[in-house]
Amino acid sequence: MSAAKTARERVRAEMVREITDIARTHLAREGAAGLSLRAIAREMGMASSAIHRYFPTKDDLLTALIIDGYNALGEAAEASQHDQDPTARWLALCHAVRDFALDRPHEYALLYGSPVPGYRAPADTVAPALRATLVCGRIIADADPAPPDSTPPPALLGPDVEALRQVMPGVSDVAVARAVTAWTALFGAVSFELFGQFDNTITHRREFFDHGMRSLARYLGL
Amino acid sequence: MSAAKTARERVRAEMVREITDIARTHLAREGAAGLSLRAIAREMGMASSAIHRYFPTKDDLLTALIIDGYNALGEAAEASQHDQDPTARWLALCHAVRDFALDRPHEYALLYGSPVPGYRAPADTVAPALRATLVCGRIIADADPAPPDSTPPPALLGPDVEALRQVMPGVSDVAVARAVTAWTALFGAVSFELFGQFDNTITHRREFFDHGMRSLARYLGL
DNA sequence: CGCTCGTCAAGAGCACTGCTCTCTTTTCTG
DNA sequence: CAGAAAAGAGAGCAGTGCTCTTGACGAGCG
């Protein structure tokens, strides 16, 4: 079904690919706000109006880039899981996220930074966005940890915990809650480092991150 | 020295105040990228070129808003500290940060979201940016905690830890490292909630946050 | 085979933006 | 009071997203 398409559709798909590729290089160079449909059209040698046939609106192009970004991060997260030990898996995941962010800072910012104003993420972004999260959930589920020194979450969190448990079946309430907190802590650490909050403070970034994530592994009970 | 200024300087200060006030309402309504010097000038009834006398560049206006934002957050953080118990102080600080973020999402995004492209934060932002952090440091220093189940950070983190200890004198290496991790975790949680990462997942946001921060208090050894 | 219709590209145009330059008016100061 | 400094206004430049209209091309149908 994907092979024998009409020639028109093949060239169209190729155009879309070329546009997103150029957009990605612009994104890497100047960030999301520096993205310009006209500049992309110029680089492709086409009229500025023609590009709207492929991406009617700038937001549509943004959405394509966001989906690609989530998928790239998800792949990196999945590829990091070639170990057995839960702590090693957790650390590998953390470093995969951090490496992705350092490698493609503007794409990371697009995914986890401030949402671009007026932009509302459409539904097709949520599945790719979940890929990395699922990797985390699988680590927790496989380890089935009993976090030390913990109190169970209050009763009214029950439904939320129940929904989260679908990602990590068989895991205790406390472990689920701690997994969420550790997950947010991971992205907090990466964002702080990337967005300049550690400037003039922390110099051994990678070591600090590694140490922090290790201590979070213990917090998780891995 | 601030009172008996010339009439010109008084009206100038008033103008600056009015501009930033209007900018803040625009910021609250449409976010940082929606900020327009021309729109502000229009609302003030002045020529679009005249506003550049007060803020030569859009970045300068952004800087003023950022400094104000850090100060507002810092004040809220300081005002939250009317308790003695370390855990209560930590929780009050966390909720102060979260309340600020929920109350003024675009301002929070300006401070802790993706940096606006091409913008380089000047040096006068770092002191206001530190106010909230200092509150956190004071809590740790006063409690002088011994985090449970922890390994000391590796030797090469020594200088960084030393610098951080100036904010929390007399605190052990492990406690310093955990304080940084907990601090980043706090902002990770707030950012995730604010930037939509919890949509369709966590419904009892405040309770989840509270529970997470409580468990981080134990992680800190408070 | 010829013709119609949907797709695509291009150009002009609208309403914006930040920022600069020049010129005039206002206000402070020696 | 005269000169200097500051502030405002207006025009203009280069850029943006997006729309509308017009013309070309190619694929499918009678």
Image (tube, coloured by chain):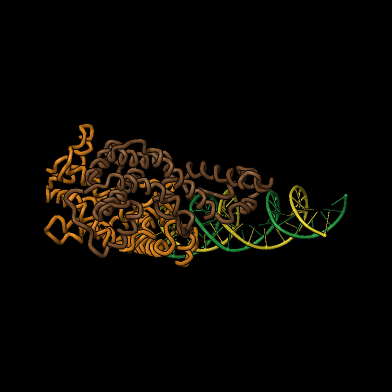
Chain colours: A brown, B orange, C green, D yellow
Q: Which quadrant, please, contains the C terminus of chain A? A: top left
Seen from the viewer's position, the closer of residues A96 and A80 is: A80
Q: Is residue A211 visible?
A: yes
- At 60% from the left and 42% from the top, the residue drawn is A43
- At 57% from the left and 50% from the top, the residue drawn is A37
Q: Is residue B185 above or below residue B30?
A: above
Horizontally, is A28 left or right of B154 in the view?
Answer: right
- At 32% from the left and 55% from the top, the residue drawn is A165
Seen from the viewer's position, the closer of residues C3 and B66 is: C3
Percent coordinates x, y for residue A118 in the rendering: 47, 60
Seen from the viewer's position, the closer of residues B51 and B204 is: B204
Residue reaching furthest front? A170
In the figure, residue B100 lies in which quadrant? bottom left
Percent coordinates x, y for residue B167 in the rendering: 18, 46
Residue reaching furthest top? B156
Percent coordinates x, y for residue A103 in the rendering: 42, 38
Seen from the viewer's position, the closer of residues A76 and B47 is: A76
Q: Is residue B176 above or below residue B9?
A: above
Q: Is residue B15 visible?
A: no
Percent coordinates x, y for residue B28 in the rendering: 39, 63
